[in-house]
Amino acid sequence: MADPVDFGFERVSPDEKTRRVRGVFDSVASRYDLMNDLMSGGLHRLWKRYAVGVAAVREGARVLDLAGGTGDLARLFAKAVGATGRVVLTDINHAMLAEGRDKLLDAGLAPGIAQCDAEALPFPDRSFDVVSIGFGLRNVTRKENALAEMRRVLAPGGAALILEFSRVAPALASAYDWYSFNVLPKLGRLVAGDEASYRYLAESIRMHPDQETLKAMMERAGFDSVEYHNLTAGVVALHVGRVY
Ligand SMILES: C[S@@+](CC[C@H](N)C(=O)[O-])C[C@H]1O[C@@H](n2cnc3c(N)ncnc32)[C@H](O)[C@@H]1O
């Protein structure tokens, strides 16, 4: 039998995690953007802008956004690569992807769309200049598989960007814990009608590899010059790995 993996603070089979993560995002899809703004006080928009700024994509670049959900990163990338570039928005979850597709179409953008698992990408080797995953890797069942796939589809000179919750500075840890375990689930219940999914969010953040551990995982996956940028005192970290 396959080794158990984390689903929040629980240990479950890989299939069970995949199934329960799907349940989380089926449940929250229609309220996902509103919840992000409320939970982060709008900060998630700045974190995403920062990530796209660090990517420094050229006009005409090919960008793949994994676990792209409601499309915030894809929208920013689409503006950066211009009419000659290509952005592909992907996600394993149909409900989240449908929200993203509609939002981007409403904004006058027409990215490629693909429903796919970050662990098994339906794209050829070396076919993108940038691969991003925003607040997605934490939810992926076998993170090593997703990292290997990100490395595989990047062209030489390309960059992978992983934007994810990380380990907060110790001085903020107790206030952050209180907020995460008391406020977030209640907000989830009031706004999205789903307390459990937002408890999973808080738990999954605690179980996700910290900055240095994720950096080492990216190096093991074959990325060069891996670095990370702490944002908001480490509430979030942006990891960048290159392919030479
Ligand atoms: C917290 S949302 C992030 C959405 C968006 N990237 C953002 O930053 O707002 C996490 C997304 O990861 C997706 N996801 C989870 N496991 C995945 C996998 N194995 N492959 C692709 N997407 C996955 C979920 O469906 C969900 O849309």
Image (spheres, rainbow, N blue to C red):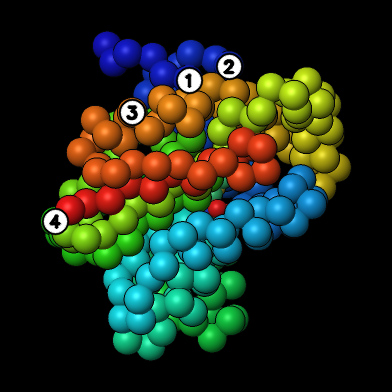
- Residue at position x 27%, y 34% from top? 219
- Residue at position x 22%, y 56% from top? 154
Regarding mark 2 in the picture, which secondary structure is present there?
A: loop
Residue 216's label in the rendered image is 3
Q: Earlier in the sequence, mark 4 or mark 1?
A: 1
The residues tagged by marks 3 and 2 sit, at their Cα atoms, a distance apart of 23 Å
Q: Earlier in the sequence, mark 3 or mark 1?
A: 1
Regarding mark 4 in the picture, which secondary structure is present there?
A: loop
Asked if 154 appears above or below 214 in the picture, the reply is below
Q: Relative to 225, is 102 on the left or the right?
A: right
The residues tagged by marks 4 and 1 sit, at their Cα atoms, a distance apart of 30 Å
The residues tagged by marks 2 and 4 sit, at their Cα atoms, a distance apart of 35 Å
Percent x, y for residue 236? 59, 41
Q: Earlier in the sequence, mark 3 or mark 2?
A: 2
- Residue at position x 54%, y 86% from top? 108
Residue 92's label in the rendered image is none
Regarding mark 3 in the picture, which secondary structure is present there?
A: helix
Q: Which residue is mark 1?
A: 6
Is residue 108 in sight in this rendering?
Answer: yes
Percent x, y for residue 224? 24, 44
Q: Which residue is mark 4?
A: 125
Q: Which residue is mark 2?
A: 9
Asked if 100 appears above or below 187 in the picture, the reply is below
